[in-house]
Amino acid sequence: QVQLVESGGGLVQPGGSLRLSCAASGSIFSIRAMGWYRQAPGKQRELVATITITSGGSTNYADSVKGRFTISRDNAKNTVYLQMNSLKPEDTAVYYCNYWGPGYDYWGQGTQVTVSS
């Protein structure tokens, strides 16, 4: 059974940085893409960033995080990262990682990111 485990969340002041990690346990094959989503209280879950597993590693970012967040992956470790810089209070949310491929769509349990002074 595949499980995705996120880590790296926490409390940070505005302007600070955090790095989220998501590692997959169990056998997982033919991943097509990995991504990060977030859900703030009272709001719907939204896309933050995605990255494909092809050699080019095509990325896609929400407009609200472009230039501040960077998604990357380690294919050998089945791990995806999200480097978050210049954090703002509006980035406060539970962040979820997602892996999808042929016939599956896995989600992590979420990690809380709070940006506050």
Image (tube, rainbow, N blue to C red):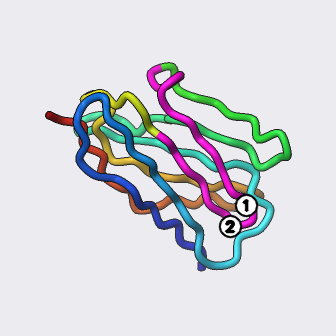
Determine the residue positioned at 52% across, 26% down.
62
Q: Residues within 10 Å of mark 1 (few under 14, many from 20)?
A: few
Residue kind at label 1, given as amino acid type = Gly
Which of the two marks, 1 or 2, is nearer to us in this view?
2
Foreground: 40 or 5?
Answer: 5
Quadrant of res 84: top left
Quarter of the image where the N terminus is located: bottom right
Residue kind at label 2, given as amino acid type = Lys
Quadrant of res 59: top right
Residue 24: mark in rendering: none
Q: Position of residue 46 (x, y in %)?
A: 45, 35
The residue that disc 1 covers is 103
The residue that disc 2 covers is 77
Q: Is residue 69 magenta?
A: yes
First in sequence, mark 1 or 2: give its number.
2
Q: Is residue 58 above or below residue 19?
A: above
Q: Position of residue 28 (x, y in %)?
A: 71, 70
Determine the residue positioned at 28% across, 52% down.
10
Looking at the rendering, the stretch of residues picked out in magenta corresponds to 64-83
Which residue, as the protein is rendered here, is positioned at the far left?
117
Which residue, as the protein is rendered here, is positioned at the far front?
16
Determine the residue positioned at 30% across, 46% down.
113
Q: Position of residue 116 (x, y in %)?
A: 18, 35
Marks 1/2: CA–CA distance: 21 Å
Please state if 31 lies on the left or on the right of 91 as rendered: right
Q: Is residue 27 above or below residue 102?
A: below
